[in-house]
Amino acid sequence: MKVLVTGGGGFLGQAICRLLIERGHEVASFSRSEHPALAALGVRQIRGDLADAAAVREAARGIEAIFHNAAKAGGWGRYESYRLANVVGTDNVLAACRAHGIGRLVHTSTPSVVHHGGRAVAGGNEIDTPPATAFNAAYPATKALAEKAVLAANDADLATVALRPRLIWGPGDNHLLPRLVARARAGRLRFVGDGGNRIDTTFIANAAQAHVDAFDHLAVGAACAGKAYFISNGEPRTLRETINALLAAVDAPQVRGTLPFALAYAAGAAMEAAWTLLPLPGEPPMTRFLAEQLATPHWYDIGAARRDFGYVPKIGFDQGLALLRQDWLANWPH
C-alpha cells in the first residue's frame, strides 16, 4: 500500500518506516526536515508543518493509509505550540483522510493522557484507567485532545486506532537516553522517592511492531477500530532497576541519590513559575508533572492489544539492553 508516516524522521517514525518498507509498502514521510536515514531506506520525504492544513492535505494525496506519529513532546513549553502541533496537526491529518478517502489511520498517543496527578497505576487497563480530565502540563493535555479526536473520527469510512507506547528506548534513541547519560555523568540525576516504584518501558522494535500489528488488523468494524491501547514490553520493573540498567548498558554512572517527592514537587512548581515569569532559557530541570511521573508506579495491562490485534513483544528487556550496548559500542562517540 501507499502509506504516509507523519514524523517519519523521528526515533519511532524511522522504526515504523523501516518495518513498512520491509513489508513491501511504498512509504512517504511528512516532517519539517530532511533525514538521510529515510533517504537510505527509500522513503519519499515531504517537508512541511502539521499546522499547515494545505501542506498536510497535499502530502496525503494518493495515500491509502496514514501513521500519525508526529507530535510535539516534552515537559515544558508554551501551550499554544503544543496545541498547534498536537491538536491542530491531528485535526489536519483527519481532514486529509476525509478529503482523499483514506480508510485507515494509526495514531501514536501516550499513556500520559490518563495521568491523574500523583495517582499510581499498577496494571491498569483501558477500561479502568480512563483519560484524565485535568492536566498540569501541555503535552498530555494536548495529546489527550488529539486522541479523543482520532477515536471520535472512527466511522464507516475511516477506521482509526490509537496506541499508547510507554517510554520507548533502544538503538537510535536521540532523546531519552542521551539526556539521562549527560545528567548521570554530570552527577545531576536523583530518584524522586526511593526509586522502588514499578514502571513500564517499550523497546523500540516492539513499539514499531505494535503499530504495524494494529495496521494489519485495522478495518471498518474491526475489534481495534475506534479504540486506544496501552503498549509496552509487558515487563514492569522498578524505576531504579530500569534507569541503572540503561545507564550500565552504555557505561554511564549509576544513580544512587534520592529526593523526597514533596521537595521535588515543590521545586517543580517553583521552577515552572520562574521559567514562566522571567523567562529563563531551555526547560526547567524539574516540573510537577515530571515529579509525579518519577515518583509513582505506572505500568499497564497490554492484554487488550494482544487480544484485538495480536501484539506480542518480541524483544525482552534484557535482550534489548544487549542490542543497545552493541549500538553504543559501534555508533556512539566514546
Image (cartoon, rainbow, N blue to C red):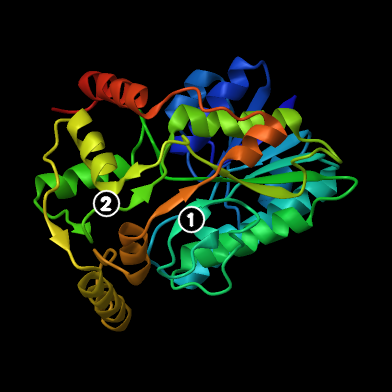
Q: Which amino acid does label 2 sit on?
A: Gly
Do the residues under discs 2 and 1 have CB atoms within 8 angstroms?
no
Q: In the rendered structure, find residue 62 and report the number of the disc placed on it.
A: none
Image quadrant of residue 129?
bottom right
Residue 11 in the image: state x and y as whole percent.
Answer: 44, 36
The kind of residue on which mark 1 rests is Lys
Q: Which residue is drawn at 58% across and 25% down?
A: 43
Residue drawn at point x = 27 percent, y = 19 percent: 326
Q: Is residue 51 above or below residue 118?
A: above
Q: Quadrant of residue 230?
A: top right
Question: Which quadrant of the figure contains the C terminus?
Answer: top left
Q: Is residue 248 left or right of residue 324?
A: left
Count neighbours of disc 2 (C-alpha within 10 A) and say few if under 14, some if 14 to 19, many if 20 or more: some
**Which residue lies at the image location 78% right of the left edge and 33% below the top edge?**
64
Identify the disc placed on residue 72.
Answer: 1
Left or right: where does residue 325 sit relative to residue 63?
left
Q: Which quarter of the picture shows residue 42?
A: top right
Q: Residue furthest bottom?
A: 277
Percent across and percent down for residue 113 are: 54, 60
In the image, is residue 325 above or below residue 114? above
Say few, some or many: other residues with alpha carbon within 10 Å of mark 1 (under 14 / 14 to 19 / 20 or more): some
Residue 176 percent across, percent down from the top left:
32, 44
> Which residue corresponds to mark 2?
196
Please provide percent x and percent y for residue 163. 60, 44
